[in-house]
């Protein structure tokens, strides 16, 4: 089965530093997502991205966050100035077709990047 | 607003025993419901999903789930658990707009005793 690839698997950064989390979605997929899970809490939706723009974002996704698809294969999440509370597992996901779940499409998740902010 | 509740944070069962993981959802319309599993160091893998039709859905690895609208539940079951089933299990509902946004429950950690 095709895979969503995330790098690195674990990233440690100092508070206030910028961090970029990288994802390679499945090649013919059109929708891209970031989710995160703070330890002991629910997996939370952050942002969805389609046709080179954000299609939806949550309240968590404030001005400190940005997403980009810089080269047609990578999909990145940037946190401009990290805070302690940004420590979490970040999951990238992708989906193939417009029409989403109504067309029986499936969301593919990567294995996550564990971000630790010290 | 949509929400998902998994009442059991941690469950331990013996290998070979049956398993039921509970999930309750809150959603105004007919929901799209999912169960995902996460093994250590791996991503979220889809076990099964419910969109419409037959309320008993079969998934991978011998799992099944039953949608009960009257109880707003979508419980996951397996008749005989294997040691390799030890993992974290997440129930999720698709948010409005059919855009791939999922709302997850808190997860249930399954431990399997030999």
Image (cartoon, rainbow, N blue to C red):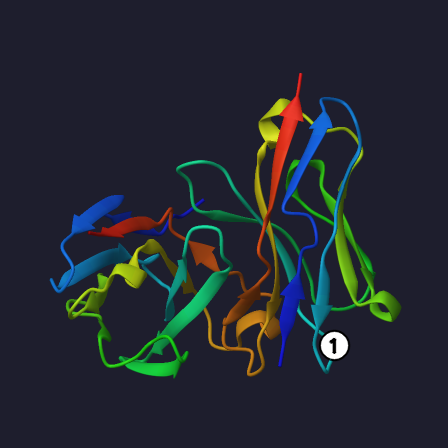
Which residue was labeled with disc 1?
B30
Q: Specify the quadrant that holds the N terminus of chain A.
A: top left
- Chain letter of mark 1 equals B
Residue B84 lies in quadrant: top right
Left/right of residue A98 with respect to residue A88 in the rendered view: right
- The count of marks equals 1
* Rendered location of residue A14, percent (x, y): 13, 55
Residue name at image x 44 percent, y 36 percent = B40
Residue B111 lies in quadrant: top right
Left/right of residue B55 with respect to residue B37 in the rendered view: right
Residue density around tag 1, few if under 14, some if 14–19, many if 20 or more, within 10 Å:
few
Q: Residue furthest top?
A: B114
* Rendered location of residue B42, percent (x, y): 42, 40
Residue name at image x 17 percent, y 61 percent = A20
Residue A8 visible in this rendered orientation of the protein: no
Q: Is residue B60 depicted above or below B6 in this figure?
A: above
Q: Residue furthest right?
A: B70
């Amino acid at each position: 089965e095709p895979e969503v690839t995330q790098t690195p698997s674990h990233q440690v950064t100092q508070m206030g530093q910028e961090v970029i989390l990288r994802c390679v979605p499945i090649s013919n997929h059109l929708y891209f997502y970031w989710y995160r899970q703070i330890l002991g809490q629910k997996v939370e939706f952050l942002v969805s991205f389609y046709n080179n723009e954000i299609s939806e974002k949550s309240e968590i996704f404030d001005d400190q966050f940005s997403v980009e698809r810089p080269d047609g294969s990578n999909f990145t999440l940037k946190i401009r100035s990290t805070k302690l509370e940004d420590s979490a597992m970040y999951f990238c996901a992708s989906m193939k077709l417009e029409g989403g779940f109504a067309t029986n499409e499936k969301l593919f998740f990567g294995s996550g990047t564990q971000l630790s902010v010290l | 607003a949509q929400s998902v509740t998994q009442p059991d944070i941690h469950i331990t069962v013996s290998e070979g025993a049956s398993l039921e993981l509970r999930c309750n959802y809150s959603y105004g319309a007919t929901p799209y419901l999912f169960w995902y599993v996460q093994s250590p160091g791996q991503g979220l893998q889809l076990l099964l999903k419910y969109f419409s039709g037959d309320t008993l859905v079969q998934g991978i690895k011998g799992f099944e789930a039953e949608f009960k609208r009257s109880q707003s539940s979508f419980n996951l079951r397996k008749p005989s658990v294997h040691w390799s089933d030890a993992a974290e299990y997440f129930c999720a509902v698709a948010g409005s707009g059919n855009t791939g946004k999922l709302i997850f429950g808190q997860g249930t950690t399954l431990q399997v005793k030999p």
